[in-house]
Amino acid sequence: MSPLTDTRKRELRRELESIVGQAAVLSDPDELMVYESDGLTLFRALADFVVFPTSAQHVSAVVKLANRENLPFVARGAGTGLSGGCLPTEGGIVISMMRMNRVLEVDYENQIAVVEPGLVNLHLSWKVGPRGYYYAPDPSSQQACTIGGNIANNSGGPHTLKYGVTTNHVLGLEVVMPDGEIVWLGGKTREACGYDLAGVFVGSEGTFGIATRIVVRILKKPQAVKTVLAVFDAIDQASAAVSAIIARGLVPAAMEMIDRLTIQAVEDAFNCGYPRDADAALLIELDGLAVGMDTQAEHIVAACRESGAREVRTARSEAERQLLWKGRKSAFGAYGRVSPAYMVMDGVIPRTKLPYVLRRVNEIVAAAGLRVGNVFHAGDGNLHPNILYDPRKPGEEARVVAAGAEIMKVCAQVGGSISGEHGIGLEKADFMPFIFSAADLALMHRLKSAFNVSGLCNPGKIFPTKKSCVEVGPVAYRPHAIEEKGLAQRF
Amino acid sequence: MDTTTHAAPPAAAGPLSLHGLSVEGVNQCVHCGLCLAYCPTFSELGTEMDSPRGRIFMIKSLAEGRMSLSDSTVRHLSLCLDCRACETVCPAGVPYGRLIEAAKAEIERDRPGALGRRLFRWLNFGLLLGHPRLLGLAASGARFYQASGLQRLVRKSGLVRLLPGTLPAWEALLPPVPAKAERTAPPRVTPAEGPRRARVALLTGCVQSVIFAAHNRATARVLAKNGCEVIVPDGQGCCGALNAHGGDHERALAMARKTIDAFESARADAVVVNTSGCGAHMKAYGHLLAADRGYAERAKRFAASVRDLAEFLAQEPLRGSLSSVPLTCTYHDPCHVAHGQKIKSEPRTLLAQIPGLRVVELAESDWCCGSAGIYNLTEPEMATRLLHRKVSHVLATGAEAVVTANPGCILQIQAGLGAHGSAVRVLHLVEILDRAYGGPGGAQ
Amino acid sequence: MPDALLDKLRAAVGAANLLTGVELSPYVVEGRTPEAAVFPGSIEEVAVVMALASQVGRSVTPWGGGTAASVGMPAPRAGLIMGLRRLGRLLDHEPGDLTATVEAGMTVAALQTALGSRGQWLSLDPADADRATIGGVLATNACGPRRHLYGTARDLLIGVTVVTADGSIVKGGGKVVKNVAGYDLPKLFIGSYGTLGVIVEATVKLRPLPGQEELVCVRFDRLKDAGAAVRAIAASDLLPNAVELLDGAAAAGAGLAAGSPTPGGLLVVGFDGVREQVDWQRAELARLTGPLGGRDVRPLEVAAWARLTPAARAAFGATAAVMALAVLPSQVAETMEQGAGIARGRGLQSAWAAHAGVGVVRGAVASDPAPTDPAALAAVLAEWREMARAGGGHANLEWAPLVVKSQVPVWDDPGAAGRIMERIKAQLDPRNILNPGRFVAGI
Ligand SMILES: Cc1cc2nc3c(=O)[nH]c(=O)nc-3n(C[C@H](O)[C@H](O)[C@H](O)COP(=O)(O)OP(=O)(O)OC[C@H]3O[C@@H](n4cnc5c(N)ncnc54)[C@H](O)[C@@H]3O)c2cc1C
Ligand code: SF4
Ligand code: SF4
């Protein structure tokens, strides 16, 4: 809890008000409590203040104040993060970017836009859509998450398969450094001058500073789009279809898999047209030139059929296509219909290992006496097993966390990663040693020290233990809470 | 590593409720945040407490006893428009409307008047809405106030600012009350024209019957053109929607029972409603009266027979011959049609059948205009911000008229456009339909 | 260099893999001879060599194919060359995963041949592919025309193993195509010119080889019109994999200016895909460029691809300097014209070629027939840089003799971000032994 006395808090509140204005500071305990979690409710932390800046100058002044007071601070976007990334683990100031949400400039000729970080991802595509453009990174949360949060987590989405993740679309950023200085990293041109600091900043989960302006690429909408739904009676067949498509030399724009439990949840939610009795469905999208598209689609259909698809159909209208995507993108939320809570995993594996890993996931979850729904970016091998549980049932939460750790180990064992797009944050910090050595982590820590000299910017994230790695060097081992409880072991 | 730095929510403690009303629905919320950017108050303020997710969290915390009804909690809950945009987008199916009604009832119990509506409630809910005759009298008064030039005087002199509390905002919105002759209800029975399609009962509403009686008469005519025998049951009053949204749960129940009583006797195939808030509310009678032994079953049956006018008409192509309405219009989705009843394509389908009419889409067409029942009176600041937003979208379409389907929206948007000095008119969907059928003197 | 150290190095890599004395002549850069060159045969050996160098504070220059050895400032003190040619294996290629892991010393050409035999490729096409190694290409962020569609190393590198200044073996990223665990170390090392660590292994994303590929050129009388064509292509439905713009001199240098007179501008566009896609795009290109003054649309031979990136430099028998300017794509033609004007104003001849669709422009100054006046040259280069900066871009001196480099800074000023770069360098290489002084901001 906060070390600040009530008097000190009042004084600081007044100072913060003098920076951002009276209506832009929260310190009421009830209001602060509403900010205790992001999209992952397993973790909770209370801030001393939440502030709502409207300019880089505001952010800079707040950060300088935090430095003076030795108070930690953390940026928060929409709070849809799934790893506890924006939680004020050690109290201090939450800097909400939600009032910095303008599109500052759109340069259609050079296909770039300059935006503020609080802009909702989808709103950029809405803005440039009428002129035939869009912003390619499309996390399933794009209707709510912010571009600032996206750059922090290097978010991906279904179309990442062809178009890459956020980092492939960011050219430059204006950043308030952890000491309050305002600096540009990268710019509007395609080449960096010196080290690729913009590239390094993206994906740093808010620990390198706070982005206040972002230069992103916008793309021309493709001339043609074709969306294919392939339905399977066995999930292994769907996995095989993914490989068969790649083997034919095709890289679709997106290739998403949805399993039975998930299909049922999204059908309950929006009636999107997925067959309820299927074991798995693949949603495959092709885009690009109109010529040649039919030939490619035929290849896709053939590959699916060869792999045992019982039905393969193409969306006949834009409305049908949108509805299929709505189902896919609403999947996480739709679990609310079948379970009061879920924990989403974010492992990545080489896609050739899909059948094996999916089997292991099901075994692990079943052994824990829980249910799992799978909906994921099959083309990228980015799995999202969603373990369903009821937080009100004693002991279930711990079983979920343990099963999650097991699944992450399996991903690591097959040469994969513990996070494909949601970030390490608080949730997976103690699992970093699954895939990184002490030397790897030490180097990352050195890099962090170059940006975040005082360590006040979003502390407690990414690195395995909270205090021990402040010194550079081999990272001291400290057991994760769940290990202490005997629920998981490190290997 | 601990997963929390402070008191965790208590584990299982039985079903959650507020003011005796179940709020178990909060457990459906998985905190995904997908609703955030669709919530008008969150979009304006950017504060989590003014978002659906935040409000659900507060309601949950209240029910769990983790939070108390502090000033700030009350403040954020009362700032909710009850527009239910969040319900439409929520993939988890959180029944938000029910949750906020329970929360408002709890607030009302805990600190009567906290919602800042006491005066208004006394004036309106208790007295007027429950007593159509009194409402008529009040309307005459209001009309005198307007017609006599008193209104202009009060506005000009600045006297308006001396009126108590939220009254100034109210005053500005006071609709032009039609003269008595124009306030007459439709006939008790209007015979069907052409091949008979159904026997329908029409809700003539409360505020509606005074200010927009013409819409009711038009509705009866349009339904008749479409093969319906239209009944206007006696003894109907207000459906109780405003009371329910305002936290006045007890009176809302009484009004619901009375409405059911009045309509059951009409033995109609469907109850047709042309005001969105009433339609949405009446469709929820089953839930509202679920605990009432005497009414539970009847309420369910009744609710199942309720149809929004557009929903009812769009089941078939419009009948009869339609004349051209040469106009460019745009359509504003009233919250309780689009979100409360999930009716979005039907009104557009109807408009598309009218010859000569050009319909252009409105940006954020299903965003609340700020009227939201009595919200524009109790939360004038937020209401004004949202109205502003709506009006600028309307002006951007270049349309000559905004078509919508709710008296509150009509008054609000018309006032907003007026304040912008715009000549764009706001029409009820049924007015356009009626015009295409030739209006009161409609031939054939 | 003390014999004791040489002995230790020999012990680490084997006597045959340590060069000294006259054997070092291929490693002389700007007249500076290193103390020794070591060629470790494994990552562990690289680590041992680094640790030894670090102990005695000897500077280390990682060396792949040596194709970019003269870029940047030479090290102020002699030191070790860390040659990576023995680390030349393709370690892993799983076609089903579209990934490959390769040692840093493998040449790009060798890698492409191996991948190609299984129908895939690394979509990176730097110049000098026969000599350039993967490690060097990553360290210099080299790329070619196809970056227009396929991006640069930063879009393709998914995992990297590096030996840091203290001799630790460190990896960042991983072997999967999508990964956000930990900081994005691959980005840090791309384009870092060997100043932060020695790249020893890389895992990259691959693509299936396209069925067809074709390079098409369109002649314009005026460069300006060709610039308009570049913008028209960007706004169209075309999906070219390369959009190059050359002025007359560069077109001649690349051997593409067939016919007379020499064109004011030559637009070169690449297409790939299935046959019908290539055909449709070629026709569409002709339709788009015709009204803008484009003529003589014709396909080019395959060999022309490799001549595009170095076209500006190849324009003259002897070149005084080459500058690479990063500008907005819409400013490319204007930059080329204005840049040529600046040179002419000082009595110098220049040639220009650009990856036009992405705004990377190269200008070369001729030093024939007469050697260029150094003062005029320096002034021209400084003005070019100003021109790039004025449009929000920047410019680096890609090649120039040392005399010029000592007058015109090789690297543009990174501004306030330079301080962060200095801190990164200080954190990762506290004793400043990796390519000291070669890079931006004196790093
Ligand atoms: C239903 C659902 C579906 C999802 N689908 C996907 C998906 O398909 N792909 C995917 O990648 N993710 C997905 N996510 C995760 C999440 O939406 C993304 O991580 C998103 O980028 C978070 O954005 P946010 O605005 O909510 O950020 P927050 O959660 O508020 O913050 C995330 C991180 O960003 C930092 N941050 C925020 N703003 C700034 C700033 N201006 N400068 C620096 N740091 C900042 C915070 O400190 C924190 O570390 C999903 C989440 C949900 C709930
Ligand atoms: S209300 Fe629905 S959409 Fe909003 S956070 Fe809860 S589950 Fe998600
Ligand atoms: S009902 Fe409307 S105002 Fe209230 S939380 Fe939902 S979207 Fe927001």
Image (cartoon, coloured by chain):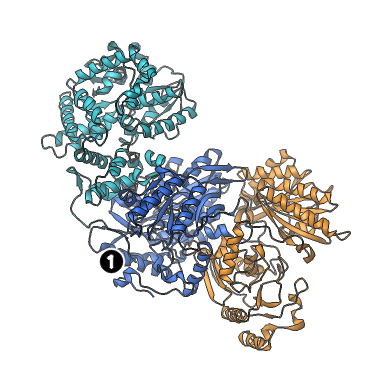
Chain colours: A blue, B cyan, C orange
> Residue C175, how many percent across, how many down?
50, 67
Circle 1 — which element?
Answer: loop
- What residue do we see at 84% from left, 61% from top? C317
> Residue C179, how many percent across, how many down?
48, 62
Judge whether A289 appears above or below B242 on screen.
below
Residue farthest along the left direction in this orientation: B294
Residue at mark 1 = A368
| Chain bearing mark 1 | A
C174 sits left or right of C193 in the view: left
> Residue A79, how many percent across, how many down?
40, 51
B361 sits left or right of A114 in the view: left
C22 sits left or right of A127 in the view: right
C186 sits left or right of B357 in the view: right
- What residue do we see at 30% from left, 40% from top? B75
Q: Relative to the observer, which residue lies in front, C75 or A289?
A: C75
Quadrant location of the N terminus of chain A in the rendered image: bottom left
> Residue A184, how many percent across, how many down?
58, 53
Q: Relative to the observer, which residue lies in front, B388 or C298?
A: B388
